[in-house]
Amino acid sequence: MLAIKALFPVGGEGTPLTHMIGQWSAILCGLSAGTLALHVLQAAEHAARTGQSSLSSADGEWFSGLAVVRTVVGVSFLYPVSVAGLSGGHYLYASGAGWSSATATGLATGLVADVLAPVTGAGTGSLGLSVEAGGLSLARALLVGETCAEYVLAERAAYAARGLSARWLPSATLPPTAGAENSGSVTWDWGSRCGTVSVPAAPSGAPAEVSYHAARRAAVADVLAAVRADAANLARGAMPGSGVTWPQEPLLPRLWAAAEAHDRAVMTAASAYLAARQQAERQAIVAGVAAQGWTSAGAVWRALGQVHAEAAALAREPVQVRAPDTALLRVALGRTWPDLVAHLDRQWLDETRIPALSGDALAAPGDESAGLMARLLNPVTRPVTEYLLASSRGERADLDPLAESVALGHTITGAVEAGWAVDLVVAAAAKNAASDALGIDGSYESATGRANPLLWWLWVVGLIHAYVLPIIPYVSVVFAGISWLISLGEMTMALPLLAFLAIRLDGRELVSAVLRPGLILTANTVVLPIYTVLALGATHYLLPFGMKMVNGTFSAAFIGSQGGSTLSLTGILAGLILSLWLQWQVITRLFAVIHEMPNRLLRYWGSQDERSDGKNAAALVATSGGAARPPGGTGSRPGGGGRGRPPHPGGGDGEGGGTVSPADGDSGGGVSKVGGAADAESSWMRGTSGLGGLSASQQAEAEAAYGRWEEAHPDRAARHDLEAYVGYVQAARRGRGGRKG
């Protein structure tokens, strides 16, 4: 907002910049008066020459309603309306840019406030990503305890029905669903032999802490209520002579819903608890983003991920589980109970097993022919390599993807720096008469000379992991902010010229092609702040999956690619460098969306990448042969040519182009020389099989020519793809060759 006020001052005498813009606008106002007079004379001459009572012609329409409206708008946007030298168009543009910036700031503040939840009860306190908070393992523990108690109680009931004493059987009980408080904890006790589950009881402290522990207790109670029926069925199925068979249906789907509900409830309670504990700090962050604006949102990106990860870590605080005493139960109940537990374990493992790729499995085919050195070293180097490459697959990787990368970077840099410190000590000890006589100093210098390059590479890898990757979100938003500032400055200076170009009394369009870049630049300025914030928020949900694509399979792929070969220290370093390169690509490509999103969206409007980052001019020169190309054609319509067909690369504004006869177009035609000899003699134009018949180099030339045509005619390019373009150009060339013959 401060930049908008500086460029578009309201009230006062303005600034030297606005004074220059006002002077330039005044000059253009004088030129526009001459342009209007010339158009009036041209229209009168046309009417006198053709004898037409109407003011329409083959080239367009004079004084059409849209042309008059366009001219009026152009004059109003060009004429300075204030002492500062700015026009109404400047102030209208400033209003739109200010609204966009304020909206983006509101979105950024809302995002931060929603995640941080600075006031208890407001916001989610996390990113809302699903978190496994131990609900599934808790469900299994509760299921086993309930099944044990149900089985023991059924055995005792069977003894009592036969009039036998069951004093030698272990005691068991079904605890209340809500559990029972006992010595500072809430316990679900199934008897001395069937185990217990306990969580800390709610202390008499802050309301947020009381609510958190109460929520954990309620979540465990809900899971117990969900598994109690399944436990009874399992116990009855294990009773000899019960006639109830072992349940054939999978257990996991029935328990999964209860486990997910537990995880959501505990995660919500943990988020609210942490938000209450850190309320002052989080309020300060939200206030800072609101005051600094949307460009500061990148600075808090990592903090939002860490808040979510810390809430998940608290939610994953394990419950205290004492499993049933299988050995004593076997003595009391025989083999029925151990068989039941073993069957339950096998079914659980089968249903929860997730197959994964391993480096040893992928390398096994090649290891069949491995040499002696590989067989000796690989059992040592492969586990080390897998540990280093898989270090980003910890439990925090799905919540804060950069946390594991940062931790790995600090570990590597710390180890290298410790190695350098040891090197100094050893170097000092090696420089003495005894070591010189034994030649130890020479061996030491030779070893360090070979090790130092590897250490330097490791240090750089650790440096990037620890310090560069975490700052990329901030840098991406800064780049987006700089692009927005450049767009503001560009539009400030370009608006008078665009208004001048709009002052024409001919044509049937309200917005002519020459004005379209200005509208696209205006739209870019408006949507860039908003979609920068939206894209920044989206990266929280895209990055975990992008990093998982690399971290989940790279170590296996790298080790597997070395099957039959020796994985040495150089290989470990190469694996770290490749892993870093892949993570760098994932992070930079995803965060590039932050400042590229507006341009991606504007392509639906016909934009050809309107980024104001200083690269457009160089790209335009590179693709146009270094020279601006004037409209083609010599007829009364620029370029001439027929309709509905892509023009020849040498064509101008006409829809046909190239060498055509007057009959091919609406009027005129002529031979276009624009495009140069390079386009006229390009080998891809001499083909006869369309795009599919081109070689790789010819296809590259055709794509470059199509790109130049697309820049000049985005509306036509939207209707004709590259394949249609190549087919038409080749057909047009064959037609010209036939007429020449």
Image (cartoon, rainbow, N blue to C red):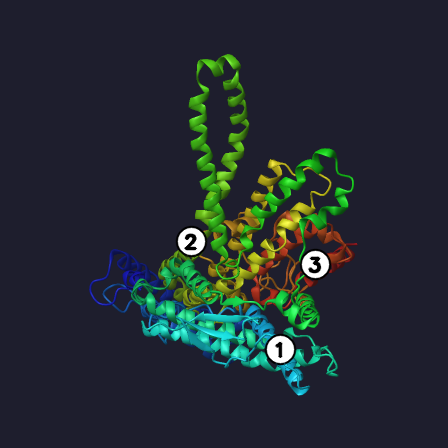
- Dot label at residue 475: 2
Disc 3 designates what residue?
726
Q: Is residue 171 above or below residue 23?
A: below
**How many numbered marks are there?**
3
Q: Is residue 118 above or below residue 24?
A: below
Whether residues under marks 2 and 1 lie with C-beta atoms below 8 angstroms apart, the answer is no
Q: Is residue 154 above or below residue 733?
A: below
Q: Nearer the viewer, residue 37 or 447?
A: 447
Measure the alpha-carbon separation of dots 2 and 3.
41 Å
Res 9 → quadrant = bottom left
Q: Earlier in the sequence, mark 2 or mark 3?
A: 2
Disc 2: CA contacts within 10 A as few (<14), some (14-19) or many (>=20): some
Res 707 → quadrant = bottom right
Q: Is residue 665 above or below residue 468?
A: below
What amino acid is labelled 1 in the image? Val
Determine the secondary structure under disc 3: helix
Whether residue 20 sits left or right of residue 414 in the image: it is left
Disc 1: CA contacts within 10 A as few (<14), some (14-19) or many (>=20): many
Q: Earlier in the sequence, mark 2 or mark 1?
A: 1
- Dot label at residue 375: none
Q: Position of residue 504 (x, y in %)?
A: 44, 69
Q: Nearer the viewer, residue 322 or 453?
A: 322
Measure the alpha-carbon separation of dots 3 and 1.
81 Å
Image quarter where the N terminus lies is bottom left
Q: Position of residue 309 (x, y in %)?
A: 45, 62
What amino acid is labelled 3 in the image? Val
Q: Earlier in the sequence, mark 3 or mark 1?
A: 1
- Dot label at residue 152: 1
The furthest residue to the left: 12
What amino acid is labelled 2 in the image? Val
